[in-house]
Amino acid sequence: MLTLDPSIITEMKTIVVSTDFSPASETALLYALAIAKRNGSRVLITHVVTENYQLISDEAQKRAIDEAWRDAQALVTEQFIAGRLDDVPYQLRIERGDVWDRLSDLITKETVDLLVIGTSGHRRLGKLLLGSTAEKIFRQASCPVLSVGPRARKNVPPGGPRKILFCTGFSHHSLMAGARAIWMAQRLQASLILLNVVADAKRRSAEQRKDLIQSNQRRLRELVPADAGLAAQPEVLVEFGNAGECILETATKHKVDLIVLGVRQSAGFYQRLRGATASRVVTGASCPVLTVRTPATEA
């Protein structure tokens, strides 16, 4: 019997929000601040100015940096007036270079526990934080990544997510994600839905499908420790079909506030971006998606 252990999850002491000042990034900041307030975290609001140093002048680079500082100050002022920064220690960071390189350095130097990104971008000197850049971030980052996609609703639940959906195929790489989902449900007193998607339903008889549903529902229940201390018993669901579609349909039907997925660090992910379940869910979900990567030594 496999049971997830949320006690192995560390506190969220430091949260980095990568912003490009787009609507998706602003929504991402709202989610980050809500989580930070609940967990007593400090927040590093970070923008990376990207440019081709061979094609633009020093003066143009300086203008881009100055513009970024003005945008960042305006963003912080707006959040301060709205009271969202009350009791939240924060810093502004303006970095220059490749988005992932700068974020990767920051994760290591600041011992970051959560990275928050908006996956619909604002153009600044020809660079966008979406597509392969966002995918690279959540597949390479050593910390969990909260991605706010272009369809994510802007009304952020006070105090953080109230209903969490965790999808698992019972694979090894989903275990850390499951422990994180239970930990967040504990801390936020949120309701938890556990989902398993079976792909090859057409090859099974009605009786086989029924037996599989019962078996996998039992396995889902066994994932949650008896002493988890959740606000309510998790709901367990088994669906048949395409994983990405089933996750999105379930999230919409149950009006969840957060989807949690385990992801692999794959050397060949550039060749399969369009087909990746996590990428599809991030871009299609009406709520943020928390991805937790399997450590490289365990992949």
Image (tube, helix red, strand yellow):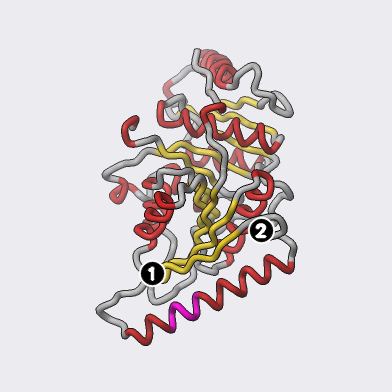
Residue at image position (74%, 65%) is 82
- Which residue is at the front of the view, 138 or 169? 138
Residue at image position (65%, 42%) is 256
Q: Amino acid at mark 2?
A: Lys
Magenta-span inclusion, residue 66 = yes
Quadrant in which the C terminus is drawn: top left
Crowd band around label 1 with a 10 angstrom C-alpha radius: few (<14), some (14–19), many (20+) = some
Residue 126 screen position, x and y as percent: 38, 74
Residue matched to label 2: 154
The magenta stretch spans which residues? 63-68
Residue 139 screen position, x and y as percent: 39, 46
Please, what secondary structure does the residue beneath circle 1 have?
A: strand
Residue 23 screen position, x and y as percent: 58, 66
187 versus 120 height, above or below: above
* Horizontal relation, residue 268 to residue 197: left or right: left
Magenta-span inclusion, residue 99 = no
Q: How many marks?
A: 2
- Which residue is at the front of the view, 196 or 100? 100
On the image, which quarter does residue 234 sit in? top right
Residue matched to label 1: 96
Q: Amino acid at mark 1?
A: Arg
Label placed on residue 142: none
Residue 228 screen position, x and y as percent: 64, 23
The alpha-carbon separation of the residues under discs 2 and 1 comes to 28 Å
* Horizontal relation, residue 203 to residue 250: left or right: left
Magenta part mainly helix, strand or loop? helix
Q: Nearer the viewer, mark 2 or mark 1?
A: 1
* Horizontal relation, residue 151 to residue 143: left or right: right
Residue at image position (49%, 70%) is 122
Residue at image position (34%, 41%) is 265
- Which residue is at the front of the view, 6 or 55? 6
209 versus 50 height, above or below: above
